[in-house]
Each structure stands twice: as structure tokens, then as C-alpha cells.
Image (cartoon, rainbow, N blue to C red):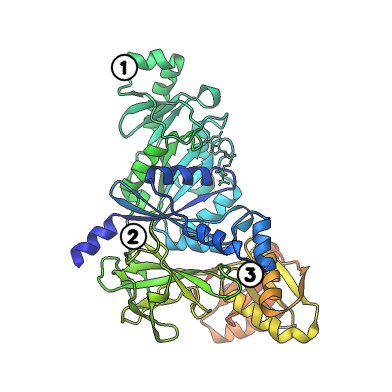
Amino acid sequence: MEKQIQKQVERRRTFGIISHPDAGKTTLTEKLLLFGGAIQMAGTVKARKAARHATSDWMAMEQQRGISVTSSVMKFNYEDFEINLLDTPGHQDFSEDTYRVLTAVDSALMVIDSAKGVEKQTRKLMEVCRLRDTPIITFINKMDREGMDPFDVLADIEETLNIECAPLSWPVGMGKEFKGVYSLHDKRLHLFSATHNGGINQGMVIDSLDDPTLDKELGLQADKLREDLELLEGAGYPFDAERYLAGKQTPVFFGSAINNFGVHELLDSFVQLAPHPQSRPAVEREVSPFETSFSGVCFKIQANMDPQHRDRIAFVRINSGKFTKGMKVRHHRIGKDVQISKATIFMAQDREGVEEAWPGDIIGIHNHGTIKIGDTFTEKEPLKFTGIPNFAPEIFRRVILKTPLKAKQLQKGLTQLAEEGAVQLFRPTQNNDYILGAVGMLQFDVIQSRLQDEYGVDAIYEPVELYTARWISCEDKIELARFKKGAARYLALDADENLTYLAPSRWRLDDAVETWPNISFHKTREHE
Ligand code: GDP
């Protein structure tokens, strides 16, 4: 068993993509799946199926917008590796889930548009990666377009994201003059030829910088390449695996996802460099993936699969041991044993046939709201995994009830929906408002439709002037009491009754932090 676990852990890679909309995440994902040979988009496939039978407004909304509120786990094999790509929803369905998915991966791939450099959403997602120093590999995309000078892109990444760049490939030209990518690892040049047909693009390879073919093919650009490489040797960071694994350095690749150029090299290096499933912290101790006893943690709840049955799927990442279908595991928060035979396990090419899963894999467990984000499952040992937090919301709305008699249902609905983690509920301590906080706009529409469909509550929103929320903690009870009095008008309780500071402006938050040096203002909150 130990040998088997070791083998299965070492061949697994579980990662997510961080990027700003339009940088090329979807295109790159498709190409990666193409190399994997098998495409499996569990969540998406399932969501589409459910949508066909959908009657509720909420599902209609999902169809109408042509996006998936749900997101997915894509699993593919490459060489002897088993790769789990966890989707990080972007565009309109950007939400707290996008952040939380990143706490369930072992590494990330950052996609940057070569014309735009580092953009806002990438910066935000990078902050989440920083929470656990997640190793990041960078792909500079769209080299077939006019973009920034590659040295400037690297400088932008280093300055904006405060991470060293270690280029492992280097581009020759860009836009119309884009001639190919030189691999600093193999010391070879791959010449570019555009393909839009989805095929795998190999192109011609030149093995040495001294090969006269290089000058013949590239002309003056050959000298430029030699100069660039000399400059890099002097000024760039050499690749350092330890610094990469510590999240301090990012290896950088250049290419064009749509032309499938540079993607093969990226994937080859990814499987070699990226870490296999790692140890995970629990309140009690660190849990190694090589332990033979099963453990897993829920990092995401998805509720829209079949609105008529109101069932939910809990996405559980396996952190140690082997999972077998039908296995009995302990659900620690409620202290009950559950048999997972009834669960849909969506995690491999042939979903029906899956009998076992290993650390780094994701299983989906059907339930009726009994599982919450952060819940831990093990064979026996009582454990509570940490590191799957709530994130401070960035946009807020006040909920107004249209039929005052339904206040109870509203409270119940909002509390339950908040438990799923897509939105957060705050009750100010000085009034009876219901304040919703989210990370993406779409969540508000989803909540409104679901309140109506599932709880029969007609609610509308009012804008509310809030900048952000911070969870409060303080060891000193007297100081905390003083703070509660002094800052009362800004305080609220979240759905789990935790004290929260709702800051109307950035200035007000900075001022409060300065005024109350012994009070801690937290950007994230662990689930109990
Ligand atoms: P996402 O929003 O990050 O998922 O981005 P998409 O993969 O949907 O790509 C956004 C747009 O950029 C689409 O129109 C793609 O066809 C285009 N695109 C993606 N990769 C490349 C590339 O390498 N070169 C060029 N010229 N366009 C690309």
C-alpha cells in the first residue's frame, strides 16, 4: 500500500490557472487537454445536462448568459502523469470560489497577455497564491501579436507581483516578426509556423546557436537572439528549483496558445517542475499525502445541478490515503459516518467506472446541505484541515424585502446560501439590515433568483457604500470591548456570528487600523 500511494502521489499534479479575462486561459486549457488526449470537463458536462431539464429562472439565467455558474474539474493524463486542472472561473462568474479553488491546488500556471502585461485580476489571484506560497509557472501568451518587449514584460511581472522571473524559453521577435522560441533548457530553437486548426505544432528545430541555418532562417534576428541571451545571462535570474517551490521565483515560457506554439514545452516542463500533492495543515498536525489513511477536505459547494431536488455537490480534495468507492468515512464537524457509495465521483475520463482516487484528486459528494466548506473527512482520526478560508468581499448590496412577512424565510435563505460560500451575509450590530458581500457581481443575481425559487422570497437590492470587510480578533478582552463600543457603527456579525468591521472607505479602514493597534483586522477567515 505504501509503495502504491507513493507512486500515485508522485505522478499527480493538481493545479489552477491564474489570468485576467482574455489573456488566453480557455485557449491554453484546450491545448493542454489536447496533449492529454482525453478531455473531461466534469462540472461543465454535468451542468449542461442539468440545464436541459431546467425549469427555474435561475437555470434560465445561466443558459441565457451562456456561461456556467458552475465550474469544473478537468482531468487528463500526460505521459505517465495524472493531471487535475481545477477551473478558476473568470469573466462574469468570477467569485469567491475562484479564490478558494486556488487554496486546493499545489501549483498554478499564470497566463499573461504579452501586449498587456500584468492585469488586475491576475494581481488579485496572485495575492491568494501568496497565502501559501504556491509555486507559479508563467506563460507569456500571444507572441504572434505585437506586444511589449519581452524584457519589459519580465520587469513588469517582477515589479508588480514582486516575484523573480527566470525565463526558461526566449522569443525571437513578435507579431509578424515572431520567428520562434529558444529553449534555454535544451539550448535549441523551435521555429514558429502558425496553425489554427488545433493540430499539434512542432515546426523546425535548430540545435545550436552556431548553426548557420540559424542565420539563414532568422537573418538579423539571429544576432538579436544571441545578444538577448547574453544580456539574460548577465541580468536575469537563473532558474532555481527551490526558489520556485517556495513561491519566490517563477519560471517563464513564451508562446502562442492559439497556434499551439510553446505549449508542448510548457507542459513538458510543468510536469517535471511542478510539485506533486503536498502536505496539508490541519489544526492538529500536518498531514502528509503519503499517509495510508484517507483524508480529504471540502473546498467548494455547487448547488445548481438539479434545482428541483435542491441537492448540492461538495467538491472534496483528497489529502492523503486511498479513496475507494463505497468507503465509509467520518464527517467530523457533525460527527457522523457517511458511506460514499451514493456519491458521484467525478474525477477521471470514465466517470461511471471510477473505483478509486488518490491524493490530489477531487471527488464530488452529493448531499442536501449537510456538508460545508472546510469540512474534513477521514477514515477515523479526528482532524480539521485549515487553509480553505473565506475571503473579504469586494462589493456589497443591502437586501430589501418586498414582502415584509417573509423576514424569517429571508433570514433562512440568506444564511443557507451564505454557507455555500458564493456570497457572505452581514448583520450590522446597530440596525436590522441584511448586507450581502461578494467578490463577483453575478453572485447577487444568482442569490436573488434562488431566494425566489427556493425560498419564495421576493427581494431587491439597494446600493450600499462599503469598501471592504475585515474580520476582527483580539486576545485582550478589555481592549476588544473598548473597540466594540468605539467602532460600533461599523460593526456587523457574519453568518457564523463572527465580528466583522465593515469599512465604508479605504481611508476609514486605514484610520481604524491605526487607531486600534491591538485589534487584528483579517482579510480572510478560516471556517470553523
Ligand atoms: P480567456 O478569457 O483567458 O479564457 O481567453 P480566451 O482563451 O477565450 O482568449 C481570448 C481571445 O484571445 C480569444 O479571441 C482567443 O482566440 C485569443 N487568443 C488566445 N490565445 C491567442 C494567441 O496566442 N494569439 C492570438 N493572436 N490570440 C489569442
Name which of mark 1 and mark 2 comes first in the sequence.
Answer: 1
Q: Which residue is label 3 attached to? A: 469
The image position of residue 174, as x and y in percent, is 52, 27
The image position of residue 404, as x and y in percent, is 80, 84
Q: Quarter-wise, where is residue 289 in the image?
A: bottom left
Whether 234 is drawn above or below 377: the answer is above
At x 59% / y 39%, what residue is drawn? 116
Q: Is residue 82 visible?
A: yes
Q: Amino acid at mark 3?
A: Ala
Q: Which mark is residue 277?
A: 2
At x 36% / y 62%, what residue is drawn? 360
Front residue of 64 and 473: 64
The image position of residue 305, as x and y in percent, is 55, 67
Q: Quadrant of ligand 1?
A: top right
Q: Secondary structure at mark 1?
A: loop
Q: Which class describes the residues within 10 Å of circle 2: few (<14), some (14-19), or many (20+)?
A: many
Q: Is residue 283 visible?
A: no
Ligand 1 neighbours mark 2 (CB distance < 8 Å): no
The image position of residue 507, as x and y in percent, is 69, 63
At x 45% / y 29%, what residue is drawn? 171
Q: Which mark is residue 211?
A: 1
Q: Amino acid at mark 1?
A: Asp
At x 33% / y 13%, what residue is drawn? 212
Seen in the image, is 467 located left or right of residue 520? right
